[in-house]
Amino acid sequence: MAAQPYGLIATFTTTPALYHAAEQVRDAGYRYWDCITPFPVHGLDKAMGLRRSIVPRISLAGGITGFITGMTMIWWTAAWDYPLVVGGKPHFSPMYAFPVSYELTILFTAFATIIGMFVVNGLPMHYHPVLKYEHIRRGMDDTFFVVIEARDPRFNLANTKALLEKAGGVSITELES
C-alpha cells in the first residue's frame, strides 16, 4: 500500500504565471498551500488570500513594554528606592528618563519582533517534505513553485492535479512525506 503523499508541487516559469495560479488555487478554496519563489513577488500575498501578519502588532507591544519599563525603572530608582535631590531638580522627570526608555524601547521591539517572527512562522523548522523534491533548489534561482498539501480538505489527487495543469503548472509531481 502506497503512503499518503505530502501533496503536489507544480513548476511555473514566470512571475505572472505563478500569480495567476495562486489566484486560481485561492479561488478553488484550498487552505493548506504555499508558493515558493526565488525573490519577493509584489502582491502575491493578496493573490494567495493571506491576511496581514500580526508581527507588527507584537513589535508594537514590545516597544510599548520597553518604554514603560524604562520610565518605571527610572521612577523607581530616582523617586522611590533612592530619592536624592540634586540641584533642586525633581525626583522624577520624563526628560532625564527618556534616554533609558528610548534604548529599552528599541531593545524590547527587536526582541519582540524576532520572537514573534519565530513563533508565527513556526521556526525553527529543521525538516520539510518539500526539501525532498529534486528540483527545489531552482526555487532559489529562477523557478517558481506552488505546493498544495494533501491535508487540505479539498485535496483530491486527480482534481488537484487537473487544477494545477489548468493553472499552467508544468512538471506536476507528488511529494513524499
Image (cartoon, rainbow, N blue to C red):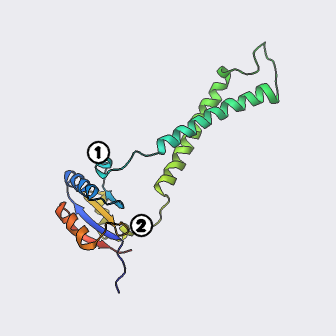
Q: Which mark is residue 128?
A: 2
Q: Nearer the viewer, mark 2 or mark 1?
A: 1
Q: Is residue 165 above or below residue 15?
A: below
Looking at the image, which residue is at 37% across and 81% down?
Answer: 3
Residue 69 x, y percent position in the rendering: 66, 35
Q: Amino acid at mark 2?
A: His
Residue 18 located left or right of residue 64: left
58 up-or-down from 22: above or below: above
Label 2 secondary element? loop
Where is residue 124 drawn, in percent x and y?
A: 50, 59
- Seen from the viewer's position, the closer of residues 98 and 62 is 62
Q: Position of residue 46 (x, y in %)?
A: 31, 47
Residue 75 at what x, y percent from top left? 73, 27
Q: Secondary structure at mark 1?
A: loop
Tag on residue 43? 1
Q: Considering only vertical position in the picture, is 142 above or below 67? A: below
First along the sequence among labels 2 and 1 = 1
49 and 88: which is toward the camera: 49
The residue closer to the viewer here, 32 or 39, is 32
Q: Can you tell which quarter of the image residue 131 is in?
A: bottom left
